């Protein structure tokens, strides 16, 4: 079973309810692969601390789009609140 992990950045900019990150370069991913994204509580970005990342999951929901064969997928975030700046997310995929 092929698969992999990685990181992506969701950037809400100056203030938005939605953000997305396109993940590419996954030559072994299939259109039928299963993908998942989550936030690690100790991650940081130049915009947000580890504490911000720990609360991110309470503020926003994450979903992943259908994979594109030998290419990648998109991670989507949506929140009822206007969020700002960039958050790091992690992902895993398996065929």
Image (cartoon, helix red, strand yellow):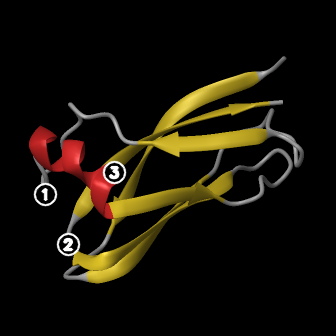
Q: Of helix, strand and loop, which one carries label 2?
A: loop
> Which residue occupies 27% across, 53% down?
56
- Mark 1: few/some/many CA within 10 Å (<14, 14-19, 20+): few
Question: Is 42 on the left-hand or right-hand side of 64?
Answer: left
Question: Is 13 on the left-hand or right-hand side of 5?
Answer: left
Q: Earlier in the sequence, mark 3 or mark 1?
A: 1
Nearest to the observer: residue 24 or residue 48: 48
Viewport quadrant of the N terminus: top right
Above or below, 74 against 35 in this view is below
In the drawing, what numbered circle is on residue 70? none
| Comparing labels 3 and 1, the label whose residue is closer to the camera | 3
The residue that mark 1 highlights is 47
The residue that mark 2 highlights is 84
Q: Residue 79: image x %, image y %?
A: 37, 72
Q: Of helix, strand and loop, which one carries label 3?
A: helix
> Which residue occupies 77% across, 58% down?
66
Question: Is 63 on the left-hand or right-hand side of 55?
Answer: right
């Amino acid at each position: 079973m092929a698969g992999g992990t990685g990181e992506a950045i969701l950037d809400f900019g100056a203030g938005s309810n939605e953000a997305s990150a396109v993940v590419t370069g996954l030559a072994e991913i299939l259109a039928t692969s299963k993908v998942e994204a989550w936030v690690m509580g100790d991650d940081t970005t130049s915009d947000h601390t580890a504490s911000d990342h720990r609360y991110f999951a309470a503020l926003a929901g994450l979903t992943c789009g259908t994979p594109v064969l030998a290419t990648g997928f998109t991670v989507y975030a949506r929140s009822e609140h206007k969020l700002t700046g960039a958050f790091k997310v992690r992902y895993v995929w398996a065929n």
